[in-house]
Amino acid sequence: MEENKKVGVGFGVMLLKDGKVLLGKRHEDPEKASSLLNGAGCWTMPGGKLHFAESFEDGGKRETMEETGIKLNNVEVICVNNDIVETAHFVTIGLISEDFEGEAKVMEPDEITEWNWFDIDNLPSPMYFPSAKVLENYKLGKFYIK
């Protein structure tokens, strides 16, 4: 266990509409995909890192607007996960919104190259594992899965 390593806090926002979930394709170039959890080329939900003194809901609204141009009217916390790879450790807060305005646009093309709606029971591959875990929590109705 390394004492100098820090745990980060991030979140993923599950936008749900008519049984479909919004996912973005992370850039294939790991430098551009900008994830400490190794997400290059994976499908991911909108999300990011929590800012100091920010609520989970406000962070979800901010990142969703920055990444997709979609305005969340209502968003709520549905789960918490412990996401660890060799080089990073994040506590990921899963949020859900079914009340939002606007259409998904590629706002940060260096990070996410496209946004698409997918049937919740027919998801694309590869999935960014923190997003896959939030979806699993939702489907199982669990707040936390070990």
Image: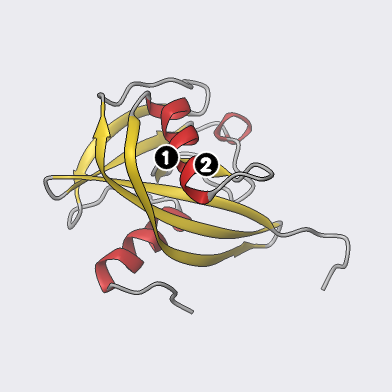
The quarter of the picture where residue 136 lies is bottom left
Residue annotated with mark 1: 46
Q: Is residue 145 left or right of residue 5?
A: left
Amino acid type at circle 1 is Pro
The quarter of the picture where residue 29 lies is top right
Rendered view: 132 above or below 55: below
From the top left corner, tell me how far across and down residue 85 is, in percent. Answer: 63, 61
Amino acid type at circle 2 is Gly
Residue annotated with mark 2: 59
Rendered view: 21 above or below 26: below
Q: CA distance from mark 1 to mark 2?
A: 11 Å
Q: Is residue 120 left or right of residue 78?
A: left
Residue at the spot 25% in from the left edge and 51% down from the top edge: 123
Q: Residues within 10 Å of mark 2 (few under 14, many from 20)?
A: many
From the top left corner, tell me how far across and down residue 44 is, in percent. Answer: 40, 44
Q: Residue furthest right?
A: 4
